[in-house]
Amino acid sequence: MTTKRYLSLIVQAIYVLITALQLIFVPNMLLSMFGFPPTSEIWIKVLGVVLIAFSTVYYGIIKFGNDEVVKYTIWGRIIVGIGFVILVISGQTLPALILFAGIDIATAVWTWFELK
């Protein structure tokens, strides 16, 4: 197994880590970029911490995982993407969240092709 085979997971891990750090240290900058109102709620930073944990899991999968484990990351990213789309369609959030859904679904499809 080589790391190059999982290039899509490397990209996903970096994307998740960068998003996590923004949510922890400059959440309102990230939120404003996508038209969301600023917040002082702690939950946005809690989400950032959770995303850091996800990025470390991605790193472990990249380094030690196998194709079967990688397949589950595909499903996880598709679930996140669909969940974001449902939140937008149901009017619970701004359409800008579709961008994040697109990134997750696009990297999931990329990973699927890498496994073929």
Image: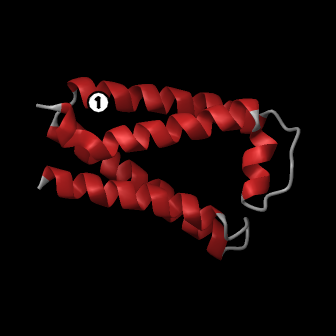
| Residue to which mark 1 is pinned | 61
Q: Residues within 10 Å of mark 1 (few under 14, many from 20)?
A: some
**Residue drawn at x 41%, y 52% as measured from the top left:** 77
**Residue drawn at x 71%, y 31% as measured from the top left:** 24
User: Dot 1 lies on which element?
Assistant: helix
**Residue drawn at x 46%, y 37% as measured from the top left:** 14
Task: Answer left or right for 52 relative to 66.
Answer: right
79 versus 28 height, above or below: below
Q: Nearer the viewer, residue 53 or 6?
A: 6
Point out residue 89 in the picture as x, y percentages from the top left corner: 63, 75
Task: Answer left or right for 3 relative to 108.
Answer: left
Residue 4 position by quadrant: top left
Which kind of residue does numbered mark 1 sit on?
A: Ile
Point out residue 31 in the picture as x, y percentages from the top left corner: 76, 51
Quarter occupied by the C terminus: bottom left
**Residue drawn at x 16%, y 40% as measured from the top left:** 67
Point out residue 110 in the picture as x, y percentages from the top left corner: 28, 57
Quarter occupied by the N terminus: top left
Residue 59 position by quadrant: top left
The colour scheme used to paint the residues is: secondary structure
Point out residue 2 in the picture as x, y percentages from the top left corner: 14, 32
Task: Answer left or right for 52 relative to 26.
Answer: left
The number of numbered badges drawn on the structure is 1
Residue 78 position by quadrant: bottom left
